[in-house]
Image: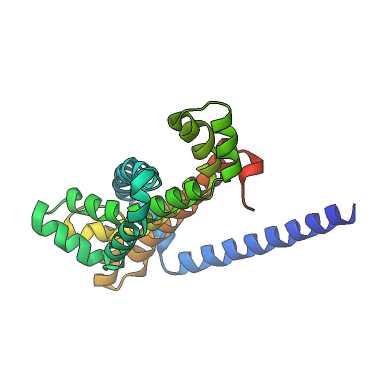
C-alpha cells in the first residue's frame, strides 16, 4: 500500500514538473515569436514535416531491410569469424561526419533527396546491425538445444526461437536508428533534400529565432513521438518475460 502511495506521489510531482516545464517553454517560445510564425505559416510547416517524415521513413525502411538480414547473416556459420571486422568497418563509416557523408553522396548521385536518403541509410545501419547481432548472439544456448531436441530445423530455430528472443534488442536498435536519423535529416536541406532543415538553417542565416524554433521544435517533437511509439511497439510485440527493464 505504501509503495502505491509513493508511486502516486511521485507521479503527481513529475506531472507538476512537466506542466511547469511546458508552461515555461511555451512562454519562451511566444517571446521569440515561434507561435506567431506557426500560426502564419501552417502550410509551409506541414509541407516540411511531410518531407522530413519521408526522408526518415524511406531511409529507415531501407536500413531495416538491409540491417536486420545482415545482422542475422553475421551470426550464421562461417560468417561469425568476420562479424567483428564487418561491425568495425560499419562503425568507421558512422564516425564520418554526417555532412561529409551527404557531400560525398551528392558528388555521385547529384542533389535532392537521394543523397540525403543514402547518407541516412548509412547512419542508420550500425545500431540495427549491432543490436541484431547482439540479440541473436545472446539467445540462451539451452533454448537452442531444446529446439534441436524437438527436431526443429535451423530455419525453424531462427524464426521460432532466436528472433522472438532477440526481438526486444532488435527493436531497440531500430528505435535508436530512427531517432538519430530524425535529427540528421535536418542536414538534407543543404543538398536540396527538404525537411525541417529549411527552417533551421534559414533561421540561422537570418538570425531569426522564430524560424529556427519552427524547424527545431517539430524535429524534437518527432523524435520524441517516434521513441514513444516504439516503446508501445515493444510492449505489444515482445513478451514481458523477454524485456530487460
Q: Looking at this view, name the residue that lies furthest to the top.
A: 151
Nearer to the camera, 148 or 35: 148
Q: Position of residue 191 (x, y in %)?
A: 17, 58
Residue projecting furthest to the bottom:
207
Answer whether residue 231 is visible to the viewer in this image. Answer: yes
Location of residue 18 in the rendering, given as x and y in whole percent from the top left corner: 63, 61
Q: Considering only vertical position in the picture, is 13 above or below 44?
A: below
Q: Is residue 103 above or below residue 149?
A: below
* Closest to the observer, 126 or 111: 126
At 35% from the left and 54% from the top, the residue drawn is 81
**Side (left or right) of 47 relative to 1:** left
Q: Nearer the viewer, residue 89 or 32?
A: 89
Q: Residue furthest front?
A: 149
Q: Residue 80: percent from the left, percent from the top? A: 38, 51
Q: How is the image coloured?
A: rainbow
**One can see residue 238 in this view:** no
Instruction: Locate residue 23, reporting x and y percent.
Output: 59, 63
As displayed, is residue 156 above or below residue 126?
Answer: above
Amino acid at each position: 500500500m505504501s509503495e502505491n502511495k509513493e508511486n502516486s506521489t511521485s507521479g503527481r510531482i513529475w506531472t507538476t514538473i512537466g506542466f511547469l516545464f511546458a508552461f515555461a517553454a511555451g512562454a519562451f517560445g511566444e517571446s521569440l515569436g515561434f507561435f506567431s510564425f506557426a500560426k502564419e505559416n501552417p502550410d509551409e510547416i506541414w509541407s516540411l514535416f511531410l518531407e522530413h517524415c519521408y526522408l526518415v521513413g524511406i531511409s529507415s525502411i531501407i536500413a531495416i531491410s538491409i540491417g536486420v538480414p545482415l545482422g542475422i547473416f553475421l551470426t550464421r556459420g562461417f560468417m561469425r569469424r568476420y562479424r567483428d571486422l564487418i561491425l568495425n568497418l560499419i562503425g568507421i563509416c558512422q564516425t564520418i561526419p554526417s555532412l561529409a557523408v551527404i557531400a560525398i553522396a551528392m558528388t555521385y548521385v547529384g542533389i535532392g533527396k537521394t543523397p540525403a536518403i543514402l547518407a541516412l541509410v548509412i547512419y542508420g545501419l550500425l545500431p540495427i546491425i549491432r543490436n541484431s547481432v547482439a540479440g541473436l548472439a545472446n539467445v540462451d544456448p539451452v533454448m537452442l538445444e531444446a529446439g534441436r531436441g524437438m527436431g526443429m530445423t535451423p530455419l525453424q530455430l531462427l524464426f521460432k526461437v532466436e528472433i522472438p528472443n532477440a526481438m526486444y534488442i532488435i527493436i531497440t536498435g531500430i528505435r535508436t536508428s530512427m531517432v538519430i536519423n530524425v535529427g540528421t535529416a535536418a542536414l538534407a536541406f543543404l543538398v536540396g533534400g527538404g525537411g525541417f532543415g529549411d527552417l533551421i538553417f534559414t533561421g540561422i542565416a537570418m538570425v531569426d529565432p522564430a524560424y529556427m524554433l519552427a524547424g527545431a521544435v517539430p524535429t524534437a517533437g518527432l523524435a520524441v513521438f517516434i521513441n514513444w511509439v516504439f516503446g508501445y511497439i515493444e510492449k505489444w510485440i515482445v513478451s514481458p518475460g523477454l524485456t530487460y527493464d
